[in-house]
């Protein structure tokens, strides 16, 4: 089984243009492709470090305020477009407030 097929929860696709920003460096980590209560898929310009941990900020489509998530890289692969990388991240930390916002957003699918 490939790492792409190890999802534990269904993911909701995200419209183009939503960026996950590293809170510490204020640099974009990548564009959000899909999201669940357990993880996210990003595509970005930088190859991530294996098992790297990040605190990211994401503003979900249709929401006013961003949520912050602690995530850990699980896998990454080069994308078909040169200089781009797919990366799967597991959510390892989220506040109760942001967890409720994420769950509500996911149910609106």
Image (cartoon, rainbow, N blue to C red):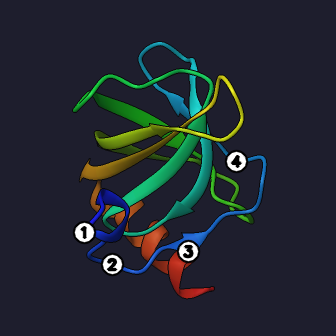
Q: Residue at x 53, y 87 (%)?
A: 107
Lower position in the chain sequence, tag 4 or tag 2: 2
Q: SS for tag 1?
A: loop
| Residue 10 to residue 44: above or below | below
Q: CA distance from mark 4 to mark 2?
A: 21 Å
Q: Which residue is identified by label 2?
A: 9
Q: Is residue 52 visible?
A: yes
Q: Dot 4 surroundings within 10 Å: few (below 14), some, or many (20 or more)?
A: some
Which quadrant is home to the C terminus?
A: bottom right
Q: CA distance from mark 3 to mark 1?
A: 21 Å
| Residue 92 to residue 25: above or below | below
Q: Dot 2 surroundings within 10 Å: few (below 14), some, or many (20 or more)?
A: few
Q: Which residue is identified by label 1?
A: 1
Q: SS for tag 4?
A: loop
Label 1 near label 3: C-beta < 8 Å? no
Lower position in the chain sequence, tag 4 or tag 1: 1
Residue depth check, mark 3 versus mark 1: number of the one nearer the observer: 1
Along the line of sight, which residue is nearer the eye, 86 or 29?
86
Q: Dot 3 surroundings within 10 Å: few (below 14), some, or many (20 or more)?
A: some
From the viewer's perspective, tell me whether residue 38 is left or right of residue 106. Answer: left
Q: Residue at x 42, y 69 (%)?
A: 36
Q: CA distance from mark 3 to mark 2?
A: 10 Å
Label 2 near label 3: C-beta < 8 Å? no
Residue depth check, mark 4 versus mark 1: number of the one nearer the observer: 1
The mark found on residue 12 in the picture is: 3
Lower position in the chain sequence, tag 3 or tag 1: 1
Q: SS for tag 2?
A: loop
Where is residue 97? Give x, y as percent.
37, 61
Q: Which residue is identified by label 4?
A: 18
Lower position in the chain sequence, tag 1 or tag 2: 1
């Amino acid at each position: 089984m490939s790492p792409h097929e190890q999802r534990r929860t269904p993911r909701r696709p995200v419209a183009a243009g939503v960026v996950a920003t590293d809170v510490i460096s204020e640099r974009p980590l990548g564009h959000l492709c899909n999201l669940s209560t357990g993880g996210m898929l990003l595509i970005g310009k930088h190859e991530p470090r294996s098992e790297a941990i990040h605190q990211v900020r994401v503003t979900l489509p249709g929401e006013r305020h961003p949520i912050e998530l602690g995530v850990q890289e699980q896998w990454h692969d080069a994308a078909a477009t040169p200089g781009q990388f797919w990366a799967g991240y597991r959510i390892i930390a989220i506040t109760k407030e942001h967890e409720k916002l994420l769950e509500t957003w996911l149910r609106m699918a």
